[in-house]
Image (spheres, rainbow, N blue to C red):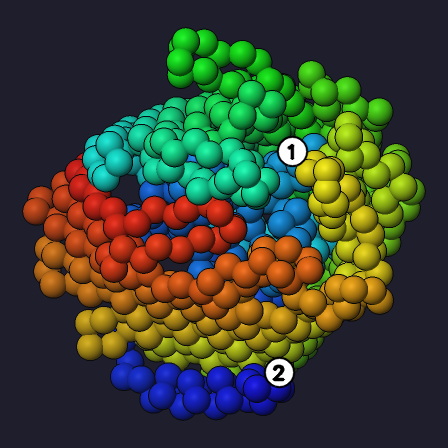
Amino acid sequence: MPFRTLSVAIVTALASPLAQAAPAAGASDLDTVFVTASRMHSSLRETLVPAQVIDRAEIERSQARDLPGLLQGRAGIQISNQGGPGKVSTIFMRGAESDHVLVLLDGIRIGTATAGFAAIQDIPVDQIERIEIVRGPRSSLYGSEAIGGVIQIFTRRSDGAITPRARLGVGSHALRESSAGIGGRSGHAWFGVDAAFQRTDGIDACRGSGTLLEGCFVDEPDRDGYRNRSLNLRGGLDLADGLTLEANALHADALNEYDGSIFGGNESHNVQQVTGATLGYAPSEVVRLTAQAGRAYDKSTTYFYDEGNGTHSDVGRFDTRRDTAALQAGFDLAPTQALSLGFDWQSDNVESMTAYAVTRRDTFATFAEYQARFGAHRLQASARHDDNEQFGGHGTGSLGWGMDLSRGIRLRATAGTGFKAPTFNDLYYPGSESPDLRPERSRSVNLGVSQDGEGWNWTFDVFESRIDDLIVLLYPPPDYLGTGLNIEQARIRGAELTFAVAAAGWDLTGELGHVDPRDRSEGVNHDNLLARRARNTARLDIDRDFGELRIGSTLRAASGRFDNLANTVRVAGYGTLDLRVAWAFDPDWTLEARASNLLDKAYETIAWYNQPGREYGLALRWAPVAR
C-alpha cells in the first residue's frame, strides 16, 4: 500500500471510534510537565514535537523488569537485543541508527564515546521515576546524536512525606531481585536513596555457529546469566528564595555472561556511573537561570572464563568518560512568549587496553529557542551551533507550528536538521580504522494531528528524514570487525498512531508504527532496507481494576526485518502476549504476578540471538501510604 494511502487509511479508521468513546477518567495526563522537547518546562499538551511520558505508575503497572522491555514496541521505538536480560540492547528510533538516539539521565548525557550508544540494559527500572520520549531530531537543542530522537530518564525522587519502599521478586530462569529505598522532604531539603539487585541464570544467548562464522562465531550452548547491583542517590535543597540546588548519583554494576571465545571473551563486567548537580536561580517571575555539570562514566572489562580449569583471563578494557556542563537562561518575554539562551560544553575521553589514535575531543555549543502562542497558533523555533574539536562547526535548526481547532483537535508541523559526529570506534578501532569518516547530517519533517477529550486521546504523525553520509559497517571476509563507510544518503519515511481510552472501567492504549528506511545511495544496495528495522510494529496495553485486583495484558508485534545491508539475511516477524495481575490486599502491600511471552513464541531481534520463551514472575511490593 502506498505510504500516503496507508496514512489516510489509519487515521480515518481510528479517529471516528475514539472520538465517540464514552467519557471517563483521564486516559493520560496531557498537562504533565515536560522538559525534554524544549529544555524548558511546558505541558505535554503544548509540545509541538511527537512526545510521550512513561511515569512511575505506568512502570509499576507494566511489571517490566528491564528498560528494553519497558520501551519495546512504543511508537517509533524498536529494540535489538543480543540474547535476553542484560545483553547488549540498542534502540532504533524512527528508522534511524542505534547511535542516533540521545539518552539523558537526570539531564546528563550518557553513552560511551567508543560505541556511541547508552547501555540501557544496565539501568534498573526500579531506579526510574519517569521517562520522557521525544521522537524526531532535537540536534537544534542537544547537538550530536539527537537525529532519531531523545530519551530522558529521571531517577526516583520524593518530595512529600518521608516514606520507605521495597520490592522482592522471583521468576523463571532463577530470577531473584530486590529493591528498597526511602525518600521525602523535610523543611527546605528533600532526598531519595534507592538500592536494587537483580540476578538471573538467563538463557542460551546465541545459537551461532563457529563453522559458519555467523552470530557469535562460536558454539557454546549454555545459560548466559546476568547480575546487576545499583545504588541511586538524589536530593535537593532550597538555599534561598528562588535559589535551589539539586544533585544526583547513579551507580550500576553489572556482570554479563555471553557466548564468546578466548579472543572476544565470554564475560563482561560493566560499571555505569552518572553524577550531576544543578543550581537554579529565579530572581523574578520572568527570569530563570540554570547551571548544570555532570559526568557519565562507563567502564567495561571483558574476560574469558575457561570452565574446564575455572580460570579467568583478561581480554579487553574500555573506560570512557563524558564530562558536560551547561548554562541556560530563560526569559518570559510576555505571558505567551518565552526565550531561552544557553551554552553547552562536552569532553569525551577514552582509556583502554586497546590503543586508539585519538583519545579525547571537546565540543562547545551555543543554542537559543523561542516559543510563543498567538491565539490558536503556537510557534517554536530553535537554533544551535556546535564547534567540534575534530570536525569543526555545525549549525542545526528546528521550526514548529501548531494550531488548535474545535473539538480538541490540534494540527502541528515541524522541520528540523541534525548531525552526528563519528564515534571513536567508527574512526579508530584497531583493525577497522576509518579515520576519514564524515559526520552524518539529517533533515526531517513531521506532520501531525491529535485530538483529546475527557477520558480519551489520539495522535497521528507522518514523517520523512533524509540522512546524508550515513555511517554503516561493512563486514567483508576476513574482516569480521567491520569497517566504517559513509553511504551517500538514506531516506526514511514513516507513520505513527497512538491512542488511549478509559471507558467502562477499562484502560486501553495502543501504539502503531510504520517505517520505510531505505539506502538511497548508488550501488549494489540501492533501495535496500536498512538493517534491523521492522517496517511495522504494534503495541497494545489493556488494564482494568476490580477493586483490590488489577489485571492487564500487553501485546507486541513486529514484522520481519533484514539483518544486513545486502538484505540477504532475514529475521522473521513475531508477536508476543504478556499477562499480569496485581492484588492490593492491603493499602501498603501489593502482590504481583506476570506471565511473559505466554504463547512461548520463539523469535529473534538480531539474527542468531535467542529471545526468552515463556517466563513467569512473582513479586511483593511494599509502599506505605501517607496517613
Foreground residue among 214 and 315: 214
Q: Is residue 470 left or right of residue 131?
A: right
Q: Is residue 440 left or right of residue 250?
A: right
Q: Determine the CA span between mark 2 and mark 1.
A: 36 Å
Query: Residue at horizontal 17%, vertical 38%?
Result: 620
Name the residue carrying label 1.
112
The local secondary structure at tag 1 comes to loop
Specify the quadrant that holds the N terminus.
bottom right
Q: Where is residue 562, by image quadrant?
A: bottom right
Count every numbered label the image shows and give the total: 2
x and y percent of residue 41 in the render?
Answer: 57, 54
Specify the quadrant that holds the C terminus.
top left
x and y percent of residue 403 in the render?
Answer: 62, 81
Query: Residue at horizontal 83%, vertical 26%?
Result: 358
Task: Say the numbered circle drawn on residue 3.
Answer: 2
x and y percent of residue 122 in the render?
Answer: 47, 34
